Structures are given as structure tokens and as C-alpha cells.
Amino acid sequence: MEIKKTLLMPKTKFEMRGNLSVKEPNIRKSWQQLKIYDSLIEKNKGKKPFVLHDGPPYANG
């Protein structure tokens, strides 16, 4: 008996592997074409900067 056939896995359009090294250049190119970063800078122009200090201040917490 093949175990794979006994698993009830959901059907999804997501690929099993991310292939980020292949996909990221295309994503970054589309962001540049859509001027995502420029629109965020323009949207937040004149607002007070927000800084999030995440995590403990030292390696041992």
C-alpha cells in the first residue's frame, strides 16, 4: 500500500517549494514598476517616524 494515497491533504494552488531565488527578482521588478517604495515614502511624508524595537536588548534576554 502506498502511504501517500492514504493521506488526506488539502488541495491548494501553492507550490510545494518556494523557489524564492527564482521568484524574488520578478517580485522586486514588479514592485519597482509599481513604485511601491516611492508611494510609501510619499504616503508617510511629514509624519513622525515609527521605530519598533523588537526583541530583548541583550542576547541573554
Image (spheres, rainbow, N blue to C red):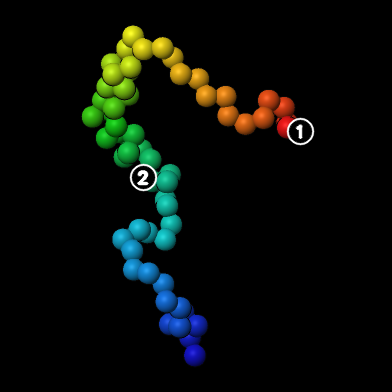
Position above or below: 39 against 29: above
Mark 2 or 1 closer to N-term? 2
Which is nearer the eye, 49 or 7? 49
Q: Which element type, helix, strand or loop, lies under badge 1?
A: loop
Residue plotted at (45% across, 83% down): 6
Residue plotted at (29% across, 32% down): 31
Q: Which element type, helix, strand or loop, lies under badge 2?
A: helix
Residue plotted at (45% across, 78% down): 7
Position above or below: 15 against 46: below
Q: Which residue is mark 1?
A: 60
Numbered mark located on residue 10 in the image: none
Position above or below: 15 against 22: below
**Residue at the far right in the pictured view:** 60
Disc 2 residue type (three-letter): Lys
Q: Is residue 38 visible?
A: no
Across and down, in percent, residue 38 comes to 29, 20
Across and down, in percent, residue 43 comes to 28, 19
Q: Is residue 29 visible?
A: yes
Are the two marked residues, 2 and 1, in contact with CB atoms closer than 8 angstroms?
A: no
The quadrant holding residue 53 is: top right
User: Horizontal placement of 33 versus 5: left or right?
Assistant: left
The quadrant holding residue 37 is: top left
Across and down, in percent, residue 3 comes to 50, 83
Please tell me how crowded label 2 is: few (under 14), some (14-19), or many (20+) other residues with Cα within 10 Å: few
Disc 1 residue type (three-letter): Asn
